[in-house]
Amino acid sequence: MIILDILIVLIVIGLIGSYAIRRRKRKQALLVVQEASRKDVALAMKKVSYALDEQKITLSDKVGTEPELVSDIWGRGVLAFEFSFGKTDLKKSELEPLRHWINEVVEKYAKDNQIPSKYEYPVFCVTDIWLYHEELHVDVANVINEPTREYIEDLHKVE
């Protein structure tokens, strides 16, 4: 009986250890994908940043190409990043045309750099644009995995 108890304890410990190792590897893989995605999106948005500065849309010297991962409230694996471009004198009514223009710029970047999309959405997609304390903020998704595609789909349903 004692041998059976010890065997059951060892099996449980083995299962827990196996689960922990698998979970850690999955988390590490997600971090690698997030970092690669962050770099790709940052390079695309650098083009946007330069264009915003050239056209005097942003008024500060702040270059907003340091992406912040959008909160995980949307789910694990969503590759969406927030960019802050500094002060602007834009009005809220001007944001939607600017959103379309930014989408065109990042789509051109993807095409020029041969970054394909395997989904029905462009590989880079502006998901939100807003003003906060007169600063321009833009969320951009890198649609390279299923959770991000589903995130884009959910946003389209809400709009």
Image (tube, grey):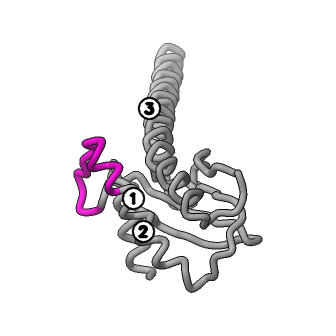
Q: Amino acid at mark 2?
A: Trp
Q: CA distance from mark 2 to mark 3?
A: 33 Å
Look at mark 1 in the image and give the residue it sits on: 105
Dot 2 lies on which element?
helix
Relative to the observer, which residue lies in front, 76 or 43? 43
Residue name at image x 71 percent, y 52 percent: 61
Dot 1 lies on which element?
helix
Residue extending farthest to the right is 133
Q: CA distance from mark 1 to mark 2?
A: 6 Å
Labels 1 and 2 touching (C-beta < 8 A): yes
Question: Which label is found at residue 29?
Answer: 3
The answer to which of marks 2 and 3 sits earlier in the sequence is: 3
Query: Where does the image place residue 122, in percent across and percent down from the top left?
Result: 30, 59
**Dot 3 surroundings within 10 Å: few (below 14), some, or many (20 or more)?**
few
Residue name at image x 23 percent, y 62 percent: 120
Question: Which label is found at residue 56?
Answer: none
Q: Which residues are magenta?
A: 107-121
Q: Amino acid at mark 3?
A: Ala
Look at mark 2 in the image and give the residue it sits on: 101
Q: CA distance from mark 3 to mark 1?
A: 30 Å
